[in-house]
Amino acid sequence: MSTRPDPMPHLTAAAAAAAEPGQPGALFTALDKAMGAAIGHKLFTILVIHPGARESQRYYTNMPKEYPVGGRKPITETPWFQKVLGQGVPYIGYDYADITDVFFDHELIRSLGCESVLNVPVRWNGTSIATINLLHQAGWYSEADVPAAKLFAALAAPGVMKVIAEG
């Protein structure tokens, strides 16, 4: 892990994007850029939870060919789910072994040069409504990244609520 830049200018830019037309796309694109600059990532996705339907949906990705947006998948009650979505606790996978323990598509993840992950729940009204998922080279993320990541995730809430409301 390298020293991270001051996240404040990037938080400010992402917050300003929430006021722009074209939501939630403008906000999610700004979060992708801002979190890339402040924390770093190779792969960035936003997974929206549709709680009534018990389904998840990849709504945003910076790699649409490898990780396309689209259809919904049933939610599986895994230990990762309980921690990140149930308890609202960010998850750090430090290396490829951690990735293989949690993600069925670990080979694709590794083929993109990603061997670490930071999953940050987007919380609203006591519930996880989405995750922002940052993936990078092995050893990239640490607990020091979590406070800024949680602030960025809070900024995502209005965009996620719009996605959920539109069904």
Image (cartoon, grey):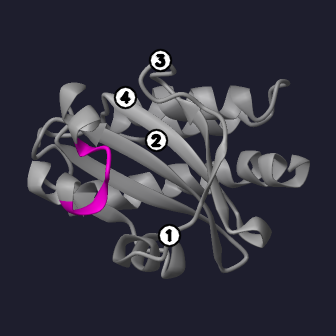
Q: Disc 2 and disc 3: Cα gap in Å?
A: 31 Å
Residue located beneath label 3 in the image: 65
Vertical side of 78 occupied by 63: above or below:
above
Residue 9 place in picture, x, y as percent: 48, 33
Residue located beneath label 2 in the image: 8
- Marks 4 and 1, the one that precedes in the sequence: 4
Q: Disc 4 and disc 1: Cα gap in Å?
A: 32 Å
Secondary structure under tag 2 reads helix
- Marks 3 and 1, the one that precedes in the sequence: 3
Q: Nearer the viewer, mark 2 or mark 1?
A: 1
C-beta proximity under 8 Å, tags 3 and 1: no
C-beta proximity under 8 Å, tags 2 and 3: no
Give, as a three-letter code, the residue at label 2. Met
Classify residue 128 as left or right of residue 25.
Answer: left
Who's the residue at 26% across and 60% down the image? Answer: 92
Q: Disc 3 and disc 1: Cα gap in Å?
A: 25 Å
Give, as a three-letter code, the residue at label 3. Lys
Q: Disc 2 and disc 1: Cα gap in Å?
A: 36 Å
Secondary structure under tag 1 reads loop
Q: Residue 37 carries which label?
A: 4
Secondary structure under tag 3 reads loop
C-beta proximity under 8 Å, tags 2 and 1: no
Residue located beneath label 1 in the image: 76
Asked if residue 71 is among those painted magenta in the image, a careful observer would answer no
- Marks 2 and 4, the one that precedes in the sequence: 2
Who's the residue at 80% across and 54% down the image? Answer: 164
Q: Disc 3 and disc 4: Cα gap in Å?
A: 22 Å
Q: Which of marks 2 and 4 is in front?
A: 4
- Marks 2 and 1, the one that precedes in the sequence: 2
Q: Give the range drawn in magenta.
A: 101-106
